[in-house]
Image (spheres, grey):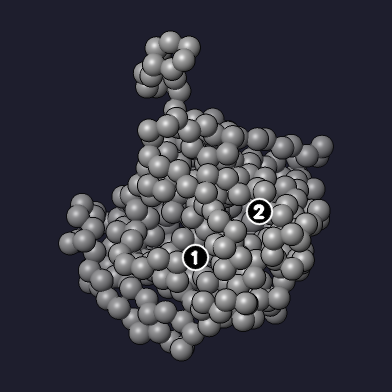
Amino acid sequence: MVTQQPLLGPGQVMIDQIYVEKLTPLNVTHKYPIVFWAGRGQTGDNFLNTPDGRQGLASYFLDRGYVVFLTDQPQRGRSPWLPGQGTLEETTVDYVQKYFTTVEKFNLWPQAILHTQWPGTGVPGDPIFDAFFATQVQFQTNRSLSELNSRAAGIALLDRIGPAILITHSQAGPHGWGIGDLRPSLVKGILAIEPEGPPFINEIIGSGSARPYGISTLPLTYSPPVTHPGIDIEHVTIPPRASNLSACIQQGTPTRMLVHLSKFPVLVLTSEASYHAVYDYCTVNYLRQAGVDALWLNLPAVGIRGNGHFSFLEKNNRPIFAIMEKWVSEAERTGLSTL
């Protein structure tokens, strides 16, 4: 709570709350619900339907007997923001085209030319693009504040609903790691669709140092403990293994283990033509080095090609959904990351 002096007079107001929508199938057949956490400038609506009117990812899981929870991050969409609590921005048309819908036309990374699966033309005036762009909302630019609020909201939600599997996308990736770190007994798996990365540095979108705890801005539980990440975590740069990939920053010696994130299975999903295709392998290797049971679903390696950063909205999303559901089912049944 904070105190303000609005038009209606001084008094306390609530801040940093989270909007959560629960959807329950007629016949619940799975033990754990799925909590969806959308990426930057997105809301839980991302997962209901595609912008061209097809069934979305959450609806797919709902049809298969899963209870699903859709969230809008604090200070975004249906989770209200109080002016003065950080700074908000909006995503532009230019940004959406360059990084999501028509990446093949801009060729900002080597794999971009392979993008073929966005429905419609991907440009303003096309009804599918316009429907997608209409869903873009404000986002908190302060990464520390965004992570802090999402962690607090996420653990409050899990404390209320009990054990669940998290599906995160993009900027929400570090939020999922933080929630899992703080509630490892309640997180039964994390399926991270192209989580924000790579470790310690920005690539493609932005540059320079980032995520001082490797995969997050805020602290994670390491063993041996990390108090001053810039000092305690030794960085070793691994050269890229191909010309279309980035170098990776991994840990040196001693290797510190992510002891809470190692208590449940993790799947990282990467598309062929996304900017994440350049560096997601670094995130997977970092997780594995730190003792996490992390599996990498690199879509072209299983014959699913042409996807960008929003694979779950694109034309060939159904086989992607099927693989995701198979992993979630196995994680629920065995507690392991397997396909």
Above or below: residue 36 compared with residue 211: above
Q: Position of residue 46 (x, y in %)?
A: 66, 50
Q: Residues within 10 Å of mark 2 (few under 14, many from 20)?
A: many
The residue that appears at 23% across and 58% down in the rendered structure is: 229
The dot on residue 133 is 2
Instruction: Read off the residue under disc 1.
Output: 294
The residue that appears at 45% across and 66% down in the rendered structure is: 205
The picture quadrant where one finds residue 104 is bottom right
Residue 195 appears anywhere in the view: yes
Given the current orientation, which residue lies at the most extreme left position?
231
Q: Residues within 10 Å of mark 1 (few under 14, many from 20)?
A: many
Q: Quadrant of the C terminus?
A: bottom right
Q: Position of residue 331 (x, y in %)?
A: 60, 56
Looking at this view, is 314 or 126 the one in front? 126
**Disc 2 marks which amino acid?**
Phe
The picture quadrant where one finds residue 253 is bottom left
Q: Position of residue 181 (x, y in %)?
A: 40, 48
Looking at this view, is 326 or 19 the one in front? 19
